[in-house]
Image (cartoon, rainbow, N blue to C red):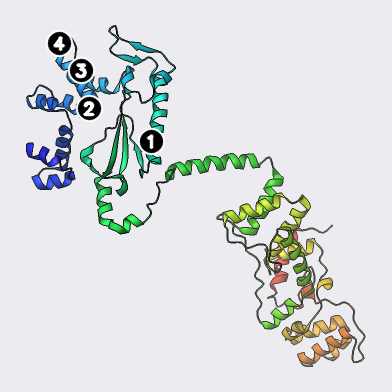
Amino acid sequence: MGDVFAARQARPHRSDIAATFGITDLKVKRILALGDLLPKIREAYRREEIDAETVRHLTMASKAQQKDWLALCADPDQYAPRGFQLKQWLFGGQSISTKVALFAIDEYPGLITSDLFGEDSYFADADLFWQKQNEAIAARRDTYLNGGWSEVVLLEPGQYFHPWDHEKTPKKKGGKVFIAVTYRGEVECHEGWLSHKEARRAREGGEQEQTAAKPPRPELTGPMQNYVDLHRHAAVRAAMLDHPAVALRLVVAHAITGSGLWQVRREPQRAANETVTASLAGCKAEAAFGKKRREVLALLGSPDEDGVVAGGNGDAFAIAGVFARLLALCDDDVMRVLTLVMAETLAAGSAVIEALGNHLNVDMGVWWQPDDAFFDLLRDKEIANSMLADVGGKLVADGNVAEKVKTQKKIIRDFLAGENGRLRVETWLPRWMKFPAESYTSRGGFRTADQWAQVQPLFVRE
């Protein structure tokens, strides 16, 4: 026992002591705890004048509490609590001495009681005492932090600071201050300590760890952050239900930028070949759409006049930025933005295009005329002959039914241009391009017509 107490003076880690003396780590911990008791208590324990339960509770007592307990033992007229009663004496009761106050006694607004001899005085209102004491502890903590200490650790009430489980470390090497508070209001400040694990890490890191900035301890734990997030979310979304205009703007902001829950993508308009690409680039509808998009980009304050609106990367800050911009716009302008975003994100070749085009009664003749790309892609002789019948009549079509596709396409173009003696046809739309779309044959394989057939029962034109 004496050898272990001697080893304790150097403050080695208890696992090192256990390995040196061939005893368990738990036994070393108990011995070190006994070593922090006042000598008179240790001597009484050796003489078996104090039972194991009593001495175990005394290891949780501060030095002042140990001295008070010894004084009770030495006074024949007093009773020194033991066992379970000692635990109550240490941690229970409301008698708090004025000697433990960190604050000035004249700052205490409550009643103070004294014994008959006037030697000891106590705070009558324990709650009021703890309010003032905690304010003083907070001030002491702030003083330490302002003085350059890396961290001030406030131990839980009643938790005793164990020097044998720490290493003395100066402020300049990252030492911390530990503040222990007993249930009786006593406050002990232990300056310049690190746990054995932290001290070992500091030694192993050397100069590299000294230069590396230590990441700060987060203000909230993970579960607490989750708690705060969910309650704030619940309150905000409940409040938003009464503000549909705000919700509209937020919907538009999400559609523009996307989020972790929203995945909105622009129609990529992928062309099958360069011919289709060139045709779309010169399309009248695309030119009109580009003009409207530039106007919306101006409303949103975008510096890129030739950019796009929808299809952001889901950044939450970007959503907030767009939302703030939309809040400053009138409802009509917000609807312009929303309409453009919806147009950008319409899927080409989908049933919704057929549904929307028929609902809006879109006249393709206003936006499209047959171009070189259309005739270049038209290579079916049966269909070309049907188209020739559309523009030139059945007699002309029957008269050229055996001609090559190239020849029949040339005749169709002559009719459209009014050349080579053909009577000009001012407006002609292939059945494929009309709303609703129609097929030229019964062979099937025309996806557009199939999609309209599926959604047509949902839309009854008046």
Q: CA distance from mark 2 to mark 4?
A: 22 Å
Q: Secondary structure at mark 1?
A: helix
Q: CA distance from mark 2 to mark 3?
A: 16 Å
Q: Amino acid at mark 1?
A: Arg
Q: Is residue 18 left or right of residue 109?
A: left
Q: CA distance from mark 3 to mark 4?
A: 13 Å
Picture disc at residue 141: 1
Picture disc at residue 49: none
Q: CA distance from mark 1 to mark 3?
A: 34 Å
- On the image, which quarter does residue 88 sit in? top left
Mark before the other along the chain sequence, 2 or 3: 2
* Residue corresponding to mark 2: 63
Q: Residue at x 16, y 28 (%)?
A: 38
Residue 435 in picture, x, y percent from top left: 79, 68
* Residue corresponding to mark 4: 76
Is there a contact, CB below 8 Å, between mark 1 and mark 3? no
Q: CA distance from mark 1 to mark 2?
A: 22 Å
Q: CA distance from mark 1 to mark 4?
A: 42 Å
* Residue corresponding to mark 3: 81
Nearest to the eye among marks 2 and 3: give it: 2
Mark before the other along the chain sequence, 3 or 4: 4
- On the image, which quarter does residue 189 sit in? top left
| Screen quadrant of the C terminus | bottom right
